[in-house]
Amino acid sequence: MRNNYPQNCTLKVKSNIVVAGTSLSGFCTSLGAGASLYFTGTECTKVVYTSSSSGSTGYPRESYSTVNIVRSIISLDWSRLSSVASFEFHIPDLLPSSMHYKDGNGSYCCVNYQLKLQLGREIIEVVPIQIISRPSCNLPAPYVEDHTRRRIMLAYCVPKGSIETSIKVDDTRLGTGEILKIWLELVNNSSVDIKRISCKLFEQIDWHSCGHYTSDTTIVASKKLSGLAGMECNTATKPTKVKAIRPSNSDHKLINSITFEAFLRVPEHTLHTSTGNLFEIKHYLCIDVQTKCGLTNVKIRVPVQITSPRRNF
């Protein structure tokens, strides 16, 4: 029983927030050489799903899963002159960041890390540890797509020309708090006006438990430009009101041209892009060029990797 052990036993760490690939250090007291210290990490998921049998109404059920990411014993250096043991442990380089995400239905996924101090089989004390993943690479990862022709259709069957797009993203590997810079040029070779242009950064989280799957997608940052046609806009943060220009020639071959830059800030609370045993977190930029109702819109999707802020490294 715990009552048989010293009441003043203590487990202390220098910091509860640690970057993967660095050291976790601290000390514990009063337990003696029989104590063991473990660093553990787990993935946990819960999926709420509907179960029904033939002829009956479905009812909600819950499925839980847990997978160990890491379990390491930490060597304790006991001083001969006191009951204090110090420790220092190297956190593995490739651990995912600590996180917890819950959707509106009660399903969740999380990554947790802990220090556990044990005497025999009894856990004496547990200290939560927040791990921040290390960016896989500090080099920029630009995205460039030049002069791509995208057809515009009425009711998915009547051709209305095309819109030519060129896009450049200066870096698709970003840390939280950093700025996503987008440059877009459109050449309107169609017979329709461009009504709106929006840029959105999406976060998609997929997780599963015992064969049951769920997913949730949210917009973490967005910019919208309304009524732009035939005029350059220097930044999406200050939309300029302009008048749409219709093609003056009868065969509609010419053409409105649009060029703009947009800046999206990645919020600090954005989860890091990662893939585990039970979950996957993905991010992507979506540029949506909207035309009139009943016509196809131009949608451009660019994969983005969100990491911890690179200024920390």
Image (cartoon, helix red, strand yellow):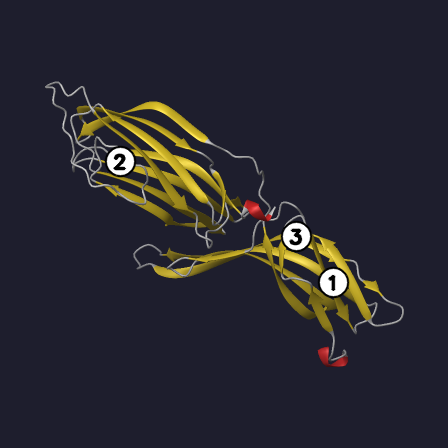
Q: Which residue is mark 2?
A: 289
According to the picture, the residue beneath numbered tag 1 turns out to be: 37
At mark 1, the secondary structure is strand
In the image, 215 versus 14, the foreground residue is: 14
> Is 14 positioned to the left or the right of 216 in the image?
right
Tell me the residue at 57%/38% (across/down).
138
Q: Are marks 3 and 1 in contact (CB under 8 Å)?
A: no
Q: Quick one: SS at disc 3?
A: strand
* Nearest to the observer: residue 100 or residue 208: 100
Q: Return the x and y of residue 300 as percentages of the image width and height.
A: 34, 33
The residue carrying mark 3 is 70
Q: Residue at x 73, y 81 (%)?
A: 3
Identify the disc placed on residue 262: none
Would you say 252 lies left or right of 265 here? left
How would you rate the neighbour count of disc 1 (Cα within 10 Å): few for under 14, some for 14-19, many for 20 or more? many
The secondary structure type at the circle numbered 2 is: strand
The answer to whether 242 is drawn above or below residue 62 in the figure is above
Three-letter code, disc 2? Val
Residue 235 pos. (x, y %): 32, 40
Residue 218 screen position, x and y as percent = 37, 50
Which callout, 2 or 1, points to the residue nearer the camera? 2
Count of numbered marks:
3
Report how far apart the C-alphas of labels 2 and 3 lie in the structure. 45 Å
Residue flagged by tag 3: what amino acid is it? Val
Q: Quadrant of residue 256?
A: top left
Q: Earlier in the sequence, mark 2 or mark 1?
A: 1
Q: Residues within 10 Å of mark 3 (few under 14, many from 20)?
A: some
Q: Residue 201: name its quadrant.
A: top left
**Residue 159 drawn at (x, y percent):** 18, 23
Tell me how far mark 2 sits from mark 1, CA to CA.
56 Å
Q: Amino acid at mark 1?
A: Leu
